[in-house]
Amino acid sequence: MVYPELPHDVNSPTHPVSAMDYMPVGPLRALQLHRLQWTVKYAYDRVPLFRKRCEERGVRPEHIRTLADIKLLPFSKKTDLRDEYPMGLRAAPMDEIVRFHCSSGTTGKPICVPNTINDIAVWQNGAMRCLAMGGVRAGDVLQVSYGYGLFTGGLGLHYGGEGLGCAVLPTSGGNTERQVMLMRDLGVTVIACTPSYFLRIMDEARKQGVDFRRDTKLRHGFFGAEPWTNEMRDTIERETGIVAHDIYGLTEIAGPGVAGDCKYRAGLHIWEDHFYPEIIDPETLEPLPDGEVGELVFTTISRCGTPMIRYRTRDLTRLHTEVCPCGRTMRVMDRISARSDDMLIIHGVNVFPGQIEAGLLRVPEVAPHYQIVLESTDTLDRFEIKVEVTPDAFSDDIRHLEDLRKRVLDAVKSIIGLTPKITLVEPNTLPRSEGKIKRVVDNRKKN
Amino acid sequence: MTIKQISIFLENRPGHLAETCRTLAEARVNIITLSLADTREFGIVRMIVDDWEKARDVLAAKGRVVNVRDVVAVTVPDRPGGMAEILSALDAAQVNVEYSYAFAFHHGEKAVLVFRFEDNAKALTALSAAGIDVLAFPDIISEAR
């Protein structure tokens, strides 16, 4: 399912691959219902766990007559993939499987997702549409600095880039010195990686005296696979002059390319012709209307290898009710800067690392590198934020630094309502990532 | 006539100052005088060294944050009231002193202090009008030997 860009399409206002993005809502809903009905029947016949859960609820595939009937179906969760490891949720016969992806999660057994050739094509289509929506075209040079392998990041963007006709540079993560050299020497115009790894690349470029604006052709960055904030996006764009795009995906559903942002940046368009979204109340599990914030749930309606029905992502967001000015009919969700898994409870208050990041980056002298440290004490838990200061911000004056510390504290406090200990540290002393970064060190004793 | 001072950000952890001094020692940079300013959370060490450019470069290469400032080396009569005279002259000209620390050597009969002023030009005019000597960098190097 590769859509060619014909010679006369170059510089056309929309890429041919984007045609589906603008599908009228009526036919789109009809297509979704058709695909949903097919998927439910397919999974009911082939996935014992799904069938068992349907039977417990007295639901049969023919009960799905409208899209709203999806609420009759049982949910699935990450633990299902773990419990059914390695291949209990596989629906396609083994000889149709062409690739596995695995995700370690945080603890214990990994999850394993078998894909058919069709699944790979659907995923590639999603990644291509994200890249095309951001303005990437045939002729661009795409450096894929996501890890290649069991993780979906590398191969996902690789296939997306090749599908569009980009020259793909599969650097994978690591060897940052060489990443910067190749970026400059090969005239890379687009990069894809985690936002934290791009910060590491920015450090390395600075060290080598490479100025993104002067010495490279980089224009776009596609960042995902970890939550990041608008403030982080502003920092990246200000320092490098590139346009930083958000790309969303998850191994359980496909990989990067499930959703992405358009130039209006109101949120991320979900490719709902393949990945049907719902928002539910995480407590009552009831579906919420568009516009309300809740847990994001996906049903894969084009997938054969491992169909996922009502998969609870644990990501919190909302679906917009207003139509995006770009004209795409695919619904928009808010950027995901908070995953419910990442929520910290500090001194009894719910805190998301993204809130802290947003506060920190409002202070211009603060570098986008920080670490949140939590430790048990006899009384109140110790809550410390270590943050790097930029070399330019350093002064020989204690008052100036104390003032900076105070401003950082105020910025964080105004968002989370707690008073952490703010520790200013030297540049390049906090851990850097070559993939997904760990910004929270929680050493508290668990009860 | 100003001289260059380097200041280095210190995280509040053991061995951090020692590490800084070791880096300078390895580059054979001599510390002529230094002053430490600290809070509970972090510190700043300010130094006059015999080669500030080299000191800055070797520290920066180690990833340290280094700041370079112009300060003034003022000679002060080493007797009761000596410091008061200097400060009165500065006060009369409405010059603000941000901080000050001393050199270990004497210049003739006089002590020598490092001053960081809010406005160096204004301070130098006031000092010269009051007949107070300030030292140039070569003077400091020769006194330090």
Image: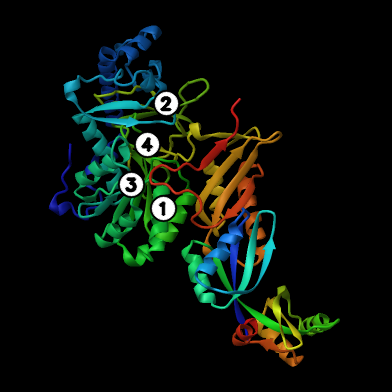
Residues under numbered marks 4 and 1 in contact, where contact means CB atoms less than 8 Å apart = no
Same chain shared by disc 4 and disc 2:
yes
Of the numbered discs 3 and 1, the one sitting upstream in the chain is 3
Mark 2 Cα within 10 Å, few/some/many (few <14, many 20+)?
Answer: few
What is the spatial separation of the Cα atoms under label 3 and label 1, in whole angstroms? 11 Å
Residue A331 - label: 4
Residues under numbered marks 3 and 2 in contact, where contact means CB atoms less than 8 Å apart = no
Q: Quadrant of residue A251?
A: top left
Which chain letter matches label 2? A
The kind of residue on which mark 2 rests is Gly
Left or right, B131 with reference to A116 = right
Q: Position of residue A150 (x, y in %)?
A: 30, 34
Q: Is residue A68 visible?
A: no
* Mark 1 or 2, closer to the camera: 2
What is the spatial separation of the Cα atoms under label 1 and label 2, in whole angstroms? 29 Å
Residues under numbered marks 4 and 2 in contact, where contact means CB atoms less than 8 Å apart = no
Q: Position of residue B42 (x, y in %)?
A: 64, 57
Q: Quadrant of residue A48?
A: top left
* Mark 4 or 2, closer to the camera: 2
Of the numbered discs 3 and 4, the one sitting upstream in the chain is 3
What residue sits right under mark 3 in the picture? A173
The kind of residue on which mark 1 rests is Arg
